[in-house]
Amino acid sequence: MRHSDISGGSPLSVLTVIRRAMEEALHQASMAADAGEIPVGAVALETSTGRTLSARGNEREGLADPTAHAEILALREAAGLLGTWRLADVTLVVTLEPCPMCAGALVASRLGRLVFGAPDPRAGACGSLYNLADDPRLNHSFEVVRGVEADRCAALLSDFFARRR
C-alpha cells in the first residue's frame, strides 16, 4: 500500500483498522437495507491516526435525494469534521465499488485511499467499468484496495435484491 500510516504504520495494524472499518461499513449497509435502501455502507477514516470520522449508509429513499449515496454522505461528514474539502489524509472504506458520481466526488475531494468490498461490474467506476481513481486526464488519483470482505459485501446486496423480487 502507498499509505501505511494508519494506527502507527505497521502493516498488521493497517489491516486491523481497515477490517474494523469494513465491519462498521457492513453494519451501516445492513441498517440501510432495514430502512429499504440499497445496502451500501461507507466509513471515512483519518489515515494518519485510524480515527473514524464518519460512518453512513445509503439514504436516497429516506432523504428523497439522488445524491445521498453512503460515500457522498460519509465524505460530507468527514469534510465538515476536518474543516476542509481536501481529504488527502482520509481513507474511505465502502462495501461496494463506487459509481461514477461517487468516484467523481472522491477525485474532487482529493481522497487519499479507497478500500472497497464488492466490485460492481454494472456501474463500478474504480476499476470495473471505468477507472476514475487513476485516469491520467483527471487532476487527482488515489490508491484503491479492492476485495476486502468482498463475499460478505456481495451477499448483503444479493440477499437484499432477492427479497425484493
Image (tube, rainbow, N blue to C red):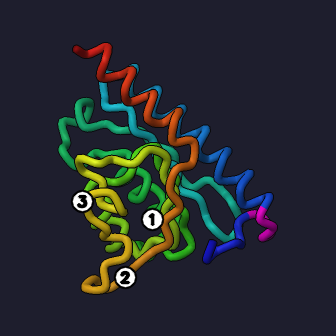
* Residue type, mark 1 in image: Ala
The residue positioned 64% from the left and 75% from the top of the image is: 3
Discs 1/2, front: 2
Q: The disc labelled 3 sits on which kind of residue?
A: Pro
Marks 1/3: CA–CA distance: 20 Å
Q: Label 2 belongs to which residue?
A: 140
Left or right: residue 85 compared with residue 49: left
Sequence-first disc among 2 and 3: 3
Instruction: Say which quadrant the N terminus sits in.
Output: bottom right
**For this view, does 87 lie left or right of residue 125?**
right
Q: Nearer the viewer, mark 1 or mark 3?
A: 3
**Residue identified by numbered label 3:** 100
| Between discs 1 and 3, the one toward the N terminus | 1
Question: Quadrant of the image for the C terminus?
Answer: top left
Q: What type of secondary structure mainly makes up the magenta span?
A: helix
Residue range of the region highlighted in magenta in the rendering? 7-11
